[in-house]
Image: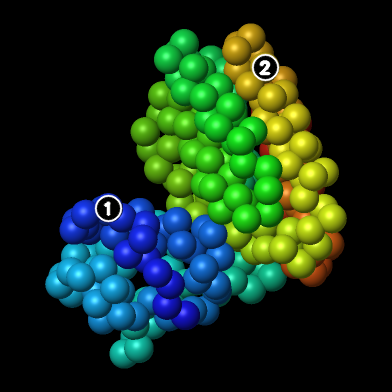
Amino acid sequence: MVSNIEKEISHKPLKDEIYDALHRQIIAGKYGPGDWLRQDDIATQMGVSMTPVREALDLLVAAGLAERVPYRGVRVREMSAKDVADAYGLRLILEAITAREAALHITPEQISNLEKKMDEMKKHVKLNEMPQERQLSREFHSAIAEASGNDLLAKVYAVVANAFPDWLLYEALYRKPELLAGSVSQTYEEHTAIMDALINGDAEKAVQKSIEHVLDSGRWLEEYLNIPSELLREKEKQVFHLIKKSK
């Protein structure tokens, strides 16, 4: 499936710009799991040579969004139910860790940045605006990871976040638009609760609210992606056991 990627960039791109454009397309659901990212098609659409496209595809593979199939090319990563459950479990752990560390180390400038992202998210509440809302939500969580002050943690978080199939969850909204208003409102309330904990430097509350936020995604995984409940409950059990032991 080939998209109008050339509209995503405003000038002749370098590898990072091509990566950003493709990243947005995948998150927006324009490329679905298993769709091939044809190097020559992308290069033609963008009006660039093959080299920066190839480098951008390498970046997508390294980020966990795509996979390279020997002798065939690069495609958006396909995930089994176990893959999704594994990513869910890791995200539960990492959201807790990054929230705790961010509450202890976040700066006023970083808080201001998060508040701006939340204000921007409030502007995107319509169904056709969900790709923008989704990207902003990802940036919100990535900014929290960066506020941890741990560069390696932030990089690990980025890989796990890319492996988490939130673009499939958003596609459920297109199938069931009656869920949109409630979903947007709930996401904003959950983000606000996380923000309040970070502002107050309350590490335990930040952990609690971040986990609750991911647990909500788990309910969507079960209900709309048909991920077996036993896989999700097992991951939750493992994470809660670790958190309980750490206290």
Q: Nearer the viewer, residue 188 or 97?
A: 188
Give the residue drawn at x 72%, y 24%: 193
Residue drawn where x is 31% and y is 90% of the image? 71
| Image side of residue 161 versus residue 203, left or right | left
- Distance (Cα) linking label 1 and label 2: 37 Å
The residue nearer to you, when weighing 126 against 94, is 126
Is residue 184 found left or right of 31 in the rendered image?
Answer: right
Please say if 158 is above or below 118: below
- Which marked residue is nearer to the observer: mark 1 or mark 2? 1
| Sequence order check, earlier mark of 1 and 2 | 1
Identify which residue is drawn at 27% across, 53% down: 10
**Frontmost residue, 108 versus 208:** 108
- Which residue does the numbered mark 1 point to in the structure image? 10
**SS type, badge 1:** loop
Residue 77 vertical placement versus 115 (above, below): below
Would you place residue 39 above or below residue 136 in this image?
Answer: below
Choose top left, top right, bottom left or bottom right for residue 151.
top left
Mark 2 secondary-structure assignment: helix
Horizontal and vertical percent position of residue 14? 19, 56
Residue tagged 2:
196
Q: Would residue 44 be seen by someone viewing this image from the given angle?
A: yes
Q: Amino acid at mark 1?
A: Ser
Pick the residue in front: 47 or 152.
47
Neighbours of disc 1 within 10 Å: few (<14), some (14-19), many (20+) = few
Seen at 58% across and 27% down, the residue is 119
Residue 134 seen anywhere in this rendered image of the structure: no
| Amino acid identity at mark 2 | Asp
User: Mark 1–mark 2 contact, CB under 8 Å?
Assistant: no
Residue lying furthest bottom in this view?
A: 71
- Quick one: label 2, few (<14), some, or many (20+) residues within 10 Å? some
Q: Is residue 85 left or right of residue 51?
A: right
